[in-house]
Image: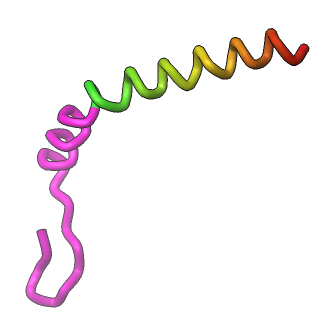
Amino acid sequence: MRDSDGVARSPDSSWVKVALAWLPVTLPLLWGIWQTVKKAAVLFR
């Protein structure tokens, strides 16, 4: 959302909606990255 002066405005409600929409995508990604990092840490210790 942009005002007439071109400043980007982000109402909290829309930000929350975006965050909730991305959660199902980002959580498995972060989980997979975390598991990979743990395995790598064990392998290279």
Left or right of residue 43, residue 30 in this image: left
Q: Residue at x 19, y 68 (%)?
A: 9
Q: Is residue 42 left or right of residue 24?
A: right
Front residue of 29/12: it is 29
- Of 30 and 19, nearer the camera is 30
The residue positioned 48% from the left and 19% from the top of the image is: 31
Q: At x 59% / y 14%, what residue is drawn? A: 35
Q: Position of residue 5 (x, y in %)?
A: 16, 89
Q: In terms of image quadrants, where is residue 44?
A: top right
Q: Is residue 3 magenta?
A: yes
Identify the residue at the far bottom of this view: 5
* Residue positioned most to the front: 43
Task: Report the magenta residues as a range.
Answer: 1-22
32 over 7 or under it: above or below = above
* Picture quadrant of residue 40: top right
Q: Is residue 4 magenta?
A: yes
Which residue is found at the position 13% from the left and 49% from the top? 14
